[in-house]
Amino acid sequence: MKLPPGVSARDFDTAVQRFQSVVGPEWVFTNDEDVHLYRDAYTPFYGEEGEIIPSGGIGPNSVEQVQEIVKIANQYGIPLWPVSTGRNLGYGGAAPRMSGTMVLDMKRMNRVLEVNESLAYAIVEPGVSYFDLYRHLRSINSRLWIDSADPGWGSVMGNALEHGTGNTNHHDHFDSHCGMELVLANGELMRTGMGALPNSPSWATFRYGFGPYISAMFGQANFAIVTKMGMWLMPEPEAARNYLVAVPRKADLVPFIDTLCNLVNRGILNSTWQVASPLLSSQAPEIAELVRNGAPVEELERAGHAANLGYWGTRLRLYGPPEIIEAEWKYIQERLSAAVPGAMFTPGHSYEFPIDPETVEDPPDDLFARASISIPNLNIFSIGGASRSQGHIFFSPIIPMSGRELVKAQEVFGQAFKDLGMHPPNFIGGMAFFKRNLVVLFGLPVSKDPAANQKLRENFRALVKVAAANGWGEYRTATAFMDDIMNVFSFNNHALRRFHETIKDAVDPNGILAPGKSGIWPKRFRESRT
Ligand code: ADP
């Protein structure tokens, strides 16, 4: 058991008793077996001194209980780490940033509070998973779509707060939220936007309310606990179509990305896509061998041409009435053909709605097929299954959605991987998770071997610096590296971090909410910053 720093065993025990009287003894977890579940399964510190071990977990069932818990935490100085479902795998799971923090596990608060069919939104509690919201919508015969993150067991709210993304036209989850209810660090309840106006019917429709747009500062932050959130949903379209696009040459990447970017900016491409090399996923043994051996570009281009695969490719998804999709697809083909001679176009899966979810089969080459038509699932966990990987953490730098910038990122990260003695990834691609940007995502394997993990940590930190030297920063990170990321957002002697800290000290003077989250440390623990 790890006590919170600076808290005596006696005070901790008293606080635990008080927590028990609020939520019931069975919902306060302090024995090792239970606390183990709140460790990060993918920690890069497995079994080492630096591994973050919480002091316990608390499972409230109502907003009032959260308020009571916060008041007690203030009294005894118990730091709390709020999670919604705590499934933030690859970015720290349910584990806090600082050992001894108690996990405030809001999984039991899993009510869908409202669904508005014509305005297309839902208001949810923290513990509502994609599966929960999906089932709820089906049970009331709603024709609204959720946009699920890759694992359907995650929290609609938690994922949005962490700036997570999905697959459909509503893939930017924080951008799709509207209106929050918050428990502040002093236990007070606050609503943002139109929610501040009692009985407003626009809480989940008009996000700005009046005055500063405060909701934005509760994403990836530790200024309050979110207990309700409005989420815009997508009316079920008449159809969804998938298309594969490929371009023949390595050098086509620049016009390929730039044209896709233009299609995004025009509002023609509204769902997520990612550019990768189809050669990488080819089952043909001769192509796999060329890739493995790092064959020269001309040879790879030739093989890609012979197999009709191309050198770079992407899958595009369009939603809407079939005639509009057809027109958009025609326009996309014209634009891409004009920009990239030899661009290839292949229609893929096509769906008409409503659909019977049981009959949807996942095409073997498309893990995200179900999620892309609003059916939450856990297919993502089949990746790496065969490799016996013990998990991974993500290195997720953001670059502008520009072909030249991606080519530069390929060179920079390719070289950095070599310099660090890591196997440089073939064909570094980009994920269009956010408009006007690409995420250049790397999953770095964690291990149970401390020496390997130590190397991983060094490499990760080195990559953060290499990225920053080129002006690229991560959009999200595992708890272990939050300080490293915040450290490079250093304009004008860390003015942004100092501003975060000023807010933190003002709204949470006792430093009880998620110390260290996103590199924001309260005064009380500021010396813990690494
Ligand atoms: P998911 O299970 O969807 O991946 P989590 O519940 O693990 O998401 O949440 C991800 C992170 O977002 C948490 O570690 C926490 O820092 C923050 N977070 C989640 N829910 C809340 C909340 N209700 N209030 C404040 N912060 C939250």
Image (cartoon, rainbow, N blue to C red):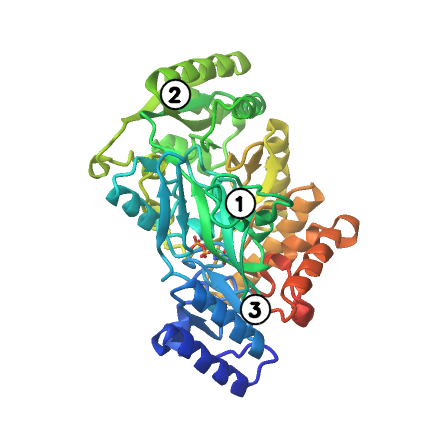
Mark nearest the camera among 3 and 1 is 1
In the shown orientation, is residue 225 left or right of residue 167? right
**Marks 2/3: CA–CA distance:** 51 Å
Which residue lies under the disc numbered 1?
Answer: 194
In the shown orientation, is residue 499 left or right of residue 274? right
Along the viewing direction, whichever of 486 and 312 lies nearer the viewer: 486
| Numbered badge on residue 308 | 2
- Among numbered discs 3 and 1, the one appearing first in the sequence: 3
What secondary structure is marked by label 3?
A: loop
Q: Residues within 10 Å of mark 3 (few under 14, many from 20)?
A: many
The three-letter code of the residue at mark 1 reads: Met
Q: Residue furthest right?
A: 492
The residue located at (43%, 71%) in the rendering is 57
The three-letter code of the residue at mark 2 reads: Asn
- Among numbered discs 2 and 3, the one appearing first in the sequence: 3
**Marks 3/1: CA–CA distance:** 35 Å
Q: Is residue 12 visible?
A: yes
